[in-house]
Amino acid sequence: MSAPPHILVVDDEPQITRVLRTSLSAQGYDIRVANSGEMALEIMKDWTPNLIITDLSMPSIDGVQLCRAVRAFSQVPILVLSVRDKEQQKVEALDAGADDYVTKPFSMNELLARTRAHLRRYPKTGETGLELTEIGDFRIDLATRVVTVAGRDLKLTPKEFDLLLFLASHPHRVVPHRTILGAVWGSNSTEQPEYLRVFIRQLRKKIEQNPSSPRYLLTERWVGYRFEPGD
């Protein structure tokens, strides 16, 4: 029997961490709790999570800073928790490397569903098939989740990889915003276009030679995006 997925919960509110530990442990996950960003980074020195769930508002190292610190050495999925009126902070977290967010107060059923989705899309090493996709200038390895474009290896976050993979599976076609959101983030996210704006911008920085004049990820104004893989 394989080991249960590891989830690191980071929040300075004991009531939140208590509820999350109880609910996630009941699903069979191996949970560790940190009450600060510093403690989270210390835990990760000798324990590797498959998912991080972190609050954004914390003293010293906040959730945005934690995202940046983690992204310096790991591509583990990061799900952030944010209060409803902190829209700019959510965008900053996505820019810093977060993959998703849930707004407080949140439904535990929604949080569990998003947790399962992230763990499915980012399985433990050795649990995926050896499929390889080659299209145009792109080589996408589903086993290692490594993308090469025109001979350059890209360092993508899990959600950036999911987004690129979905668009690459529909080359030369205009894919509507709501379709992309539903496929990559789930049906509850179809009315949250800030996801796409942030992640398309981040992807363009990584795959385009000139992000301001994209060749691969094209915007179809008011409709969606179109992926052109190159020759």
Image (tube, rainbow, N blue to C red):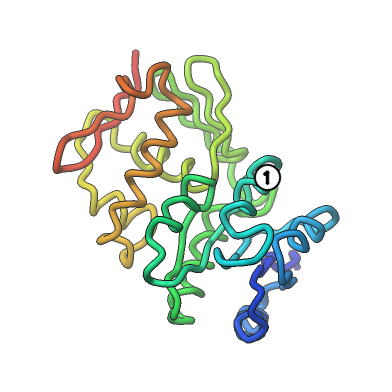
Query: Which residue is at 36% across, 38% downward?
Result: 200
Q: Is 223 rendered above or below residue 109? A: above
Q: Is 139 rendered above or below residue 101? A: above
Give the mark count.
1
Q: Amino acid at mark 1?
A: Ser
Secondary structure of the residue carrying tag 1 is loop
Give the left or right position of residue 113, taking residue 17 as reference: left
Give the left or right position of residue 174, taking residue 199 as reference: left
Quadrant in which the C terminus appears: top left
Pick the front one: 189 or 165: 189
The quarter of the displayed image where residue 22 is located? bottom right
The quarter of the displayed image where residue 2 is located? bottom right
Query: Which residue is at 48% across, 28% downward?
Result: 206
To which residue does mark 1 refer?
Answer: 74
Q: Position of residue 28 (x, y in %)?
A: 67, 78
Pick the front one: 23 or 123: 23
Q: Position of residue 51 (x, y in %)?
A: 62, 60
- Which residue is farthest left? 222
Query: Which residue is at 31% across, 20% downward?
Result: 215
- Which residue is farthest front? 60
Quadrant in which the N terminus appears: bottom right
The quarter of the displayed image where residue 73 is located? top right
Give the left or right position of residue 50, taking residue 187 as reference: right
Q: Position of residue 76 (x, y in %)?
A: 63, 51
